[in-house]
């Protein structure tokens, strides 16, 4: 028995895997894992506080409550005490700070276990919270959704969040060069440390402990990249339509008549020509735009109108054309709905399930209206809430939104 087990461990931890070409390794039974969450990026200076803080590389523990101002210089981290006797710490490379009290205060917010300060050059640091994955989920529930919702709906979302985090951890492990696994923003999952933990959140996490959604691909069992979002608007979307890339386990769209109760089900926003210009100028443009589009899109350019170029089978706009005039030139700038959302901003254009039309007579601009909030892939949070309220359990909710995935208990 010893040899196969050792072999499995060596394979799982193989360092230096040359990254993106290697798919995540199969799910194996394993102990609970610690996730590395980047909680701040490119900071020049910040404050850390805690009881009996222990700084890695020094082997010293600073007694009682201490507060430190921390910054980075080149590849060094510098920390200066703000209370009691004046002390200064300067270390080469990353500095990890932990406390036996269990919580550290970063910028006034509590985080569990340990924080690592990573110099990233230019006098800036990233800050990474290393924490047990289950405790990370305790804090995440009320940042990403609400523990006050139906318990089965919350449990379904916890499993999706755990699976997403687990997928990202394995990706980072295979890349081998990242100093964190997930961001604490909408780039991955929103996480504010422990401040939003409550007993309902912890109960849903504990009841689904170690449960992960998996997919079978090429004879292997892999974690699903369990995308989720606020409100799908009636039907979920495929990842390749949003990010131009397929992911195992997402083979079909799912009807969702449930999220119509979401306050974000329908939306509408008025865009001025100026806002559109600024959004377009932020991006790289498109190959089918006039080569001198940047010089044409000056503040004097007029928006003449917009029309839908392509729709999908649900009747939603896939691509639109905006018509402009600048001086004596008329030109057209086409965008996909996904590009328009990314460039204008995902909170202004809440989903890519949209329509366009002119503003009221006499007003210059574009009215964009649509359904749903978010990218639309995977679990619809408001749909899950309604399914939970209707008495469906979390396994059935997950099956509805991830029909090609299996639920497994990994630890
Ligand atoms: Zn929905």
Image (cartoon, rainbow, N blue to C red):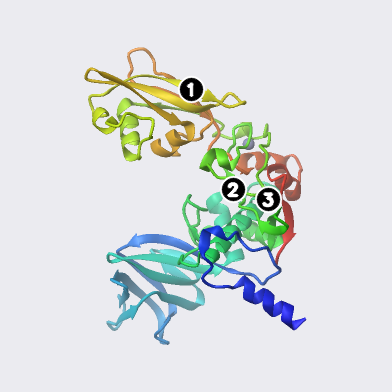
Say whether disc 1 or disc 3 marks the residue closer to the N-terminus: 3
Residue mark closest to the camera, 3 vs 2: 2
Q: Is residue 161 above or below residue 62?
A: above
Q: Which residue is mark 1?
A: 309
CB-based contact (under 8 Å), mark 1 and mark 2: no
Say whether disc 1 or disc 2 marks the residue closer to the N-terminus: 2
Secondary element at tag 1:
strand
The percent coordinates of residue 121 (x first, y second) are: 31, 66
Mark number, residue 156: 3
The part of the image, by quadrant, that contains residue 379 is: top right
CB-based contact (under 8 Å), mark 3 and mark 2: no
Q: From the viewer's perspective, is 199 left or right of 115?
A: right
Secondary element at tag 3:
helix
Q: Is mark 3 within 8 Å of ligand 1?
A: no
The part of the image, by quadrant, that contains residue 376 is: top right
Q: Is residue 56 above or below residue 249?
A: below
């Amino acid at each position: 028995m010893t040899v196969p087990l050792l072999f499995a461990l060596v394979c799982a931890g193989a360092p230096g895997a040359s990254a993106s070409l290697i798919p995540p390794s199969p799910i194996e039974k394993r102990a609970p894992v610690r996730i590395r969450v980047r909680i701040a990026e490119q900071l020049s200076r910040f404050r850390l506080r805690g009881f009996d803080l222990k700084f890695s590389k020094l082997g010293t523990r600073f007694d009682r409550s201490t507060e430190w101002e921390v910054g980075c210089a080149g590849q060094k981290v510098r920390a200066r005490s703000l209370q009691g006797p004046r002390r200064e710490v300067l270390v080469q490379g990353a500095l990890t700070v932990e406390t036996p009290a269990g919580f550290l205060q970063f910028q006034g917010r509590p985080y569990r276990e340990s924080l690592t300060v990573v110099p990233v050059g230019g006098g800036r640091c990233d800050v990474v919270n290393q924490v047990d994955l289950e405790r990370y989920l305790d804090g995440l529930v009320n940042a990403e959704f609400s523990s006050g919702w139906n318990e089965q709906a919350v449990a379904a979302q916890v499993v999706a969040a755990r699976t997403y985090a687990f997928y990202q951890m394995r990706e980072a492990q295979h890349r081998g060069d990242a100093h964190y696994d997930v961001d604490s923003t909408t780039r991955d999952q929103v996480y504010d440390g422990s401040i939003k933990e409550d007993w309902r959140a912890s109960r849903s996490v504990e009841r689904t402990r170690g449960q992960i959604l998996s997919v079978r691909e090429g004879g292997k069992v892999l974690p699903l990249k369990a995308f989720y979002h606020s409100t799908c608007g009636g039907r979920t979307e495929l990842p390749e339509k949003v990010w131009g890339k397929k992911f195992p386990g997402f083979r079909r769209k799912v009807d969702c008549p449930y999220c119509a109760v979401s306050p974000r089900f329908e939306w509408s926003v008025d865009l001025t020509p100026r806002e559109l210009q600024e959004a377009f100028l932020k991006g790289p443009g498109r190959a089918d735009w006039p080569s001198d589009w940047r010089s044409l899109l000056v503040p004097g350019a007029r928006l003449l109108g917009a029309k839908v170029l392509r729709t999908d089978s649900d009747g939603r706009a896939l691509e639109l054309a905006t018509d402009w005039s600048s001086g004596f030139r008329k030109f057209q700038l086409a965008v996909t709905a996904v590009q328009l959302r990314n460039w204008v901003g995902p909170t202004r254009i809440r989903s890519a399930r949209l329509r366009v039309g002119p503003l009221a007579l006499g007003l210059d601009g574009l009215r964009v209206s649509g359904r749903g909030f978010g990218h639309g892939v995977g679990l619809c949070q408001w749909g899950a809430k309604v399914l939970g309220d209707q008495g469906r359990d979390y396994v059935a909710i997950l099956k509805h939104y991830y029909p090609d995935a299996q639920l497994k208990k990994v630890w």
